[in-house]
């Protein structure tokens, strides 16, 4: 249609040869891009429309009788706490593992380790949940007691210590193990692609291996590690089964990590309550899901912003 | 400062493969020594063995001696990291650290020595090194910008500034101009002529005119065939190599009658 106007344009722009292969590929790529946006928009639309009754309902009608804010708030705190513990524990560990595999381990051990770590990602989360409940929680009881005895001046460890070990701390550690393979797999991939050119530049300046990693590998891999951490965080925020199994939940919002009375997380609360929920209860649960959606989106945008702030220095140019 | 390097009976291996065989040479201080020869003849491998960059590759090793002013660089108690701090290197492709500013690139090597330096000292060092690399006037207003934003020739001079900022004894250059245009090449060659007052320079080049223009001594590497080790065929004053070489192979190579 626009081609009919072509004679008025300069001849060089008149005929851009478009080969069928190009057109098919461009169409497929564009289609995929649009598809993912449509899915995202569909999910968002569903969440908003289903959450609307809860958002507009009066406080007394919401389960708990004190309004949506006080219903969701403990869950938000619980979700963020568990995810942050997981991220803080898993990220340095994952970076260490990735560096060991890419730059320190003998080649054969490195390959084997890579497989083992990837295997962690294949374990179903319900298994992690039972492991956390049956193995890790009892093992962590003495540690809980110790923190309550020695670190109670930090609000996170105010106590009293849980006798069962079924606490936010245990959940955070289980989540850390679960997201470890995601972060370390991505970190390993970006670290192994740090250009030999820059690694040699560092070595030729007289860098030790660790200094070489600091100068040429970590800065190069930083955005990849952040991306991996965000993927891990996404999984930790949304993890349902493991949390539901370990935590008793139902407590008030608290940052005290080692007591038995702690808030649940949004995802596990939805999973536990949904079967029995009716009417506005369903809308309330979906509204809490909407909150989770918004949190995840915000965290990801924040991470993007952090990565892009120093885009000039990323080495991509 | 500038030191003499004596190489005796040097064999260089990649795993079991003998890449370079039996090199004996003495590299003079305060001069430019050029290494020429066809691709794959081992001249870059030899160059990298001089600051122990060779052994960065898994399985790579050497036999023989490399002695710098009485110090055996391959002695059992010598740390390769120390060797590389004394013998700087400039690579074929400019490789400033993309995640660092121009300023930080220049002092990257000094930061490694982890001496605490005052801001005024580092400022002075950066200016001195960039002036030494003939780059100061072009970048003095954008020292905080990434080094990867410079042109190829500027990046290569930035790498030279980075190498000379740590005051090495020797500067190794592995085809430093092969990725650059003729004007940038000229700038680097002028720079080398200045730098040889202070450093021992060894340069690998594919450009025979360049070897003839800049160097005092020239070594010609060659190999008998694929899978054979490279050898140093002839090492003589540059003038002699390009006018009246001792070896037939050298003459064939420089006159283009080769292979």
Image: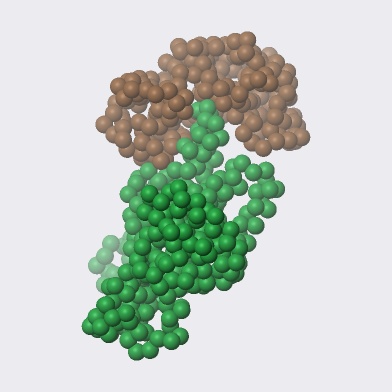
Location of residue B86 with respect to B45 vertically, above or below: above
Instruction: Name the image quarter holding residue A61.
Output: bottom left
Tell me what residue is drawn at x 29 percent, y 26 percent: B137
Q: Residue furthest bottom?
A: A279
Tell me what residue is drawn at x 51 percent, y 44 percent: A194
Location of residue A109 with respect to A279 vertically, above or below: above
Tell me what residue is drawn at x 27 percent, y 77 percent: A66
Instruction: Identify the colour scheme used.
Output: by chain
Is B239 placed left or right of B59 in the picture? Answer: left
Location of residue B5 with respect to A129 vertically, above or below: above
Q: Colour of chain A?
A: green
Residue B139 in sight from this viewpoint: yes
- Give coordinates of residue A55: x percent, y percent: 26, 79
Q: Nearer the viewer, residue B205 or A185?
A: A185
Tell me what residue is drawn at x 51 percent, y 16 percent: B169
Q: Quadrant of the C terminus of chain B?
A: top right
- Give coordinates of residue A291: x percent, y percent: 33, 71
Is A194 placed left or right of B46 in the picture? Answer: left
- Give coordinates of residue A50: x percent, y percent: 33, 83
Location of residue A142 with respect to A23 vertically, above or below: above
In this figure, what is the number of numbered marks?
A: 0
Q: Nearer the viewer, residue A40 or A267?
A: A267
Residue B185 in sight from this viewpoint: no
Q: Nearer the viewer, residue B137 or A2?
A: B137
Q: Colour of chain B?
A: brown
- Give coordinates of residue B170: x percent, y percent: 53, 18
């Amino acid at each position: 249609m626009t081609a009919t106007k072509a004679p008025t344009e300069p001849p060089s722009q008149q005929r851009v040869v478009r080969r069928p292969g190009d057109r098919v590929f461009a169409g497929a790529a564009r289609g995929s891009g649009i598809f993912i946006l449509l899915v995202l928009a569909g999910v968002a639309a569903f969440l908003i429309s289903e959450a609307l009754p809860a958002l507009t309902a009066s406080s007394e009608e919401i389960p708990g009788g004190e309004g949506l804010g006080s219903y969701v708030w403990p869950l938000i705190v619980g979700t963020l706490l568990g995810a942050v513990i997981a991220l803080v524990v898993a990220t340095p560990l994952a970076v260490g593992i990735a560096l060991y595999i890419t730059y320190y381990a003998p080649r054969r051990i490195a390959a084997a380790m890579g497989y083992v770590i990837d295997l962690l990602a294949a374990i179903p989360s319900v298994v992690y949940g039972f492991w956390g409940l049956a193995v890790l929680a009892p093992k962590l009881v003495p540690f809980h007691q110790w923190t309550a005895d020695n670190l109670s001046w930090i609000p996170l460890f105010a106590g009293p210590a849980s006798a069962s070990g079924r606490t936010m701390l245990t959940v955070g550690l289980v989540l850390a193990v679960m997201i470890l393979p995601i972060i370390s797999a991505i970190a390993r991939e970006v670290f192994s692609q740090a250009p030999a050119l820059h690694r040699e530049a560092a070595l030729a300046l007289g860098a030790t291996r660790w200094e070489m990693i600091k100068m040429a590998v970590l800065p190069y891999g930083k955005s990849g590690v952040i991306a991996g951490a965000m993927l891990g965080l996404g999984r930790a925020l949304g993890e349902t089964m493991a949390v539901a199994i370990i935590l008793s939940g139902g407590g008030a919002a608290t940052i005290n990590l080692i007591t038995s009375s702690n808030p649940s997380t949004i995802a596990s609360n939805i999973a536990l309550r949904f079967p029995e929920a009716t009417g506005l209860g369903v809308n309330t649960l979906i509204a809490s899901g909407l909150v989770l959606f918004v949190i995840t989106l915000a965290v990801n945008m924040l991470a993007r912003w952090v990565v892009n702030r120093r885009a000039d220095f990323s080495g991509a140019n | 400062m500038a030191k003499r390097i004596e190489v005796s009976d040097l064999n260089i291996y990649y795993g079991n493969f003998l890449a370079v065989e039996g090199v004996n040479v003495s590299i003079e201080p305060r001069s430019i020594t050029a290494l020429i020869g066809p691709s794959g003849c081992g001249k870059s491998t030899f160059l990298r063995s001089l600051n122990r960059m060779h052994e960065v590759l898994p399985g790579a090793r050497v036999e023989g001696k490399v002695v710098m002013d009485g110090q055996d660089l391959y002695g059992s108690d010598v740390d390769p990291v120390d060797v590389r701090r004394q013998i700087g290197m400039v690579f074929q492709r400019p490789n400033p650290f993309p995640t660092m500013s121009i300023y930080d690139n220049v002092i990257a090597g000094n930061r490694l020595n982890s001496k605490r330096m005052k801001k005024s000292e580092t400022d002075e060092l950066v200016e001195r090194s960039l002036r030494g690399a003939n780059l100061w006037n072009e970048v003095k207003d954008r020292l905080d910008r990434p080094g990867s934003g410079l042109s190829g020739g500027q990046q290569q001079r930035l790498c030279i500034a980075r190498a000379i900022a740590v005051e090495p004894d020797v500067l190794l250059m592995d085809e430093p101009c092969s990725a650059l245009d003729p004007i940038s090449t000229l700038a680097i060659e002028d720079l080398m002529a200045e730098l040889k007052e202070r450093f021992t320079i060894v340069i690998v080049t594919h450009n025979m005119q360049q070897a003839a223009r800049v160097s005092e001594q020239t070594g010609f590497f060659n190999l008998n065939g694929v899978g054979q080790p490279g050898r140093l065929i002839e090492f003589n004053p540059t003038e002699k190599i390009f006018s009246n070489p001792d070896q037939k192979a050298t003459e064939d190579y420089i006159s283009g009658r080769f292979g």
